[in-house]
Amino acid sequence: LLLAEYLRGNLSKETAPAEMHLSDCAITAEGFKHLMAVIEESDVYPLKDERRPDQGWPLYLRLENNYISNEAIQEKIDSGLIQLFTKQWGAKKGPADGAKVNLLGEDWNFRQRSGKPPSPEEARPPKMVKDRSAEVLQSNLARGLVMPVGGKGLKGRDSQR
């Protein structure tokens, strides 16, 4: 509910995320409905494609391993708010007035947990995320291949000549 309320007050074309990764967050069908209502009421999605004004990019959304009923998800697919995609085929662009959400999933499997979500005190700690790009950057800095430039960016070693 907090995320939905935050987005309701702050979502604009300038601040709209292109992706939201909300897997393993113990989101329930009620929370899902609130989030979808904010997106549905907004005119932000699909994000406009500057090269093809008749096309747009729906929000890339991951919701695996939550506690959302398949019926709640299917209802939003049937209404046209959500279109499914698989990693194999990638997210889909669509008409500028088309689906507002690209949801990772399959027709028969939305990868949700069953039962009641755990309380915050009983929830597992967040998964560690391995940030490969940060590791590469740190390695390149250590080897002198890139150098910080005034705290605002990086320059390759050869670009200083």
Image: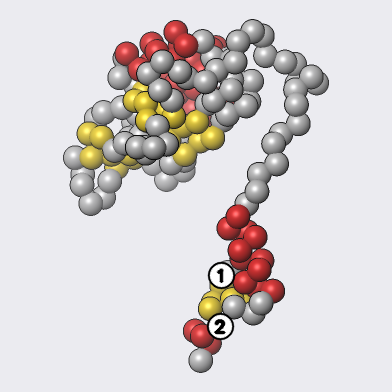
Residue at 53% x, 78% y is 156
Where residue 88 sits: x, y (%)? 39, 37
Q: Going by the picture, which residue comes out furthest to the right?
A: 121
Where residue 91 sits: x, y (%)? 36, 37
Which of the labelled discs sits on residue 157, or is there none?
A: 2
Q: Going by the picture, which residue comes out furthest to the bottom?
A: 161
Which amino acid type is marked by label 2? Arg
Task: Determine if residue 150 is in view.
Answer: no
Instruction: Give the camera-side residue of 40 and 79.
Output: 79
* Residue labelled with disc 1: 153
Left or right: 19, with 26 as reference point:
left
Q: Where on the picture, by quarter, is residue 99? A: top left
Instruction: Tell me how far mark 1 sits from mark 2, CA to CA.
Output: 13 Å
Q: Characterize the local packing of mark 2: few (<14), some (14-19) or many (20 or more) Cα atoms within 10 angstroms.
A: few
Instruction: Give the camera-side residue of 85 and 46.
Output: 85
Q: Characterize the local packing of mark 1: few (<14), some (14-19) or many (20 or more) Cα atoms within 10 angstroms.
A: few
Q: Is 97 drawn above or below residue 29 in the view shown?
A: below
Where residue 112 sits: x, y (%)? 55, 17
Left or right: 127, with 23 as reference point:
right
Which amino acid type is marked by label 1? Gly
